[in-house]
Image: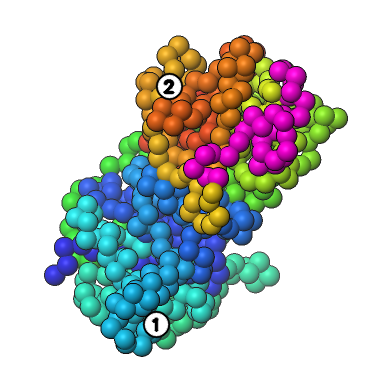
Amino acid sequence: MSAVKYVFVTGGVTSSLGKGIISASLAKLLQARGYRVTIQKLDPYINVDPGTLNPYEHGECYVTNDGAETDLDLGHYERFLNTPTSRANNVTTGSIYQTVINKERHGEYLGKTVQVIPHITDEIKRRVQALGNTGDYEVVITEIGGTVGDIESLPFVESVRQMIWDMGSTNVAVVHLTLMPYLSATGELKTKPTQHSVKALLELGVQPDIVVCRSEKPITSDLKRKVALFCNLNVNAVIEALDAPTIYDVPIHMLKEQLDKVVLSKLKLPSKQEPELDHWKSFLGKLKNPVHEARIGLVGKYIELKDAYKSINEALIHAGVANECRIDMKWIHSSKISADNVENQLGDLDGVVVAPGFGDRGIEGKVEAIRYARENNLPFLGICLGMQCAVVEFARNVMGMKDAHSTEMNPSTKHGVIDIMDEQKHIKSKGGTMRLGEYPCHLVKGTRTAAVYGKTRVMERHRHRYELNNKFLKKMESAGLAASGIYQEKNLVEIIELKSHPWFIGVQFHPEYKSTVESPHPLFVRFVKAAVENRKG
């Protein structure tokens, strides 16, 4: 008998139904019952990781402590469970094939013909079970990206079938998320798409144990019985997943539907205890009953797709709850900001975040937004490229270096206040070669940043190739821009702050990656507090 139990979450009918949120919610409920749980994402695309993908393609690229560039769903996993993920928590078809082909090149298959079955499926199963074999977890939940029936996902579904056969049906559970659409013309919910989706899964040899039906209308007991009948399920294994006001409502909805109990029953696991969700419910109460309000502008170049800044948006929600504040987000496209309209774009804000990114599109708009924030005492938080743009703006408009820029955008500038890191200068390959993952940062005593953290050493996650050029640092500090955080081993400036401003901080790292429901990030908490105070003022 397996010491570790495995749960697979698949999707049907359409993508973007919320498999990641269902996976995270189930994990949260099992964790609240006292189980040690982790969540893994299997992505069917052939990219080795999402690091080289345009955010318009797949949303933000999330980064783990160990430097893996991963799917954004890992952010949901961490925000819900308050537990770090790792490289092992995200697997792509590209990484699977890369591993198998490298083994073939090294002769590890002893001359055999390399095939999808067994070589690709064996590697998939090895990656899934790698988390279970660590001894750290009792339940491993694996979300399979895409939709059942996609050509790309076939090897993953086949691997699930094999794991059920290998390990026994009491050690593996399959949760299938589908859409139950509402036809307004007839005023009824339709079960046929769910039936077809389950049929497609059955044709691949996998019987789902639980079907979760995403719906905009309540699902009647008659409809649940109908789904159960046509999908070979017990009625209690048909779960209603109504559209929710926020993603943080979903664990509570799944608790009411007893998703966790049905999964535990299938896996022959004891309930242990009633779920301990007091903190979660307190968070929801404050989220829905704010005392204050703050209008925060997010200046970025990918704002048409909100998922491109998913972690920043969620970190602001966490910080808002910590301040009993409702965040009124204003999404501002940086390429549409100019000196002529910046007052109109930012004049109604209580605080502004300038987002990360790559490339020169929209850069001047970011610089203009930062100038406005600096000159008008508007609370400002710059992240990664946002911090670099703050350095450029300060050099141009305070220090008089009119051509100051990042050498990423203008290699010929005489004042390259942002320059490529030494170890990045000779790197040609793009995938996974940036400065990635968690690094220590020393905070300078007496600075605003040190006061925000309440300590002098922190660990934060990075994703960048360029840095503040130390050649200009002394002049900048003399002019009033303080380096308040340093990576001492390489003498890299990690944090800058403006001494004469009520709240003006830029960070080279990504604090949004470390913000969770239980542990909102202090930089975001204090930034929102400053925005609230600015509104009152």
Q: Is residue 271 magenta?
A: no
Give the residue number, with chain letter if any, for mark 2: 443
Q: Amino acid at mark 1?
A: Val
- Crowd class of label 2 (few under 14; some 14 to 19; many from 20; radius 10 Å): many
- Which residue corresponds to the image point at 22% horizontal and 69% vertical from the top-left? 171
Which residues fall within the magenta stretch? 396-425
Provide residue 58's location: percent of width, then percent of height: 57, 58
- Label 1 sits on a secondary structure element that is helix
> Regarding mark 2 in the picture, which secondary structure is present there?
strand
Question: Which residue is painted at 33% across and 44% down in the image?
Answer: 83
In the displayed structure image, the side of residue 67 where residue 161 appears, left or right: left
* Image position of 276 (left or right of 309): left
User: Any magenta on residue 410?
Assistant: yes
Residue on which disc 1 sits: 116
Q: Look at the picture and state if 372 lies above or below 317.
A: above
Whole-percent x and y of residue 487? Answer: 43, 29
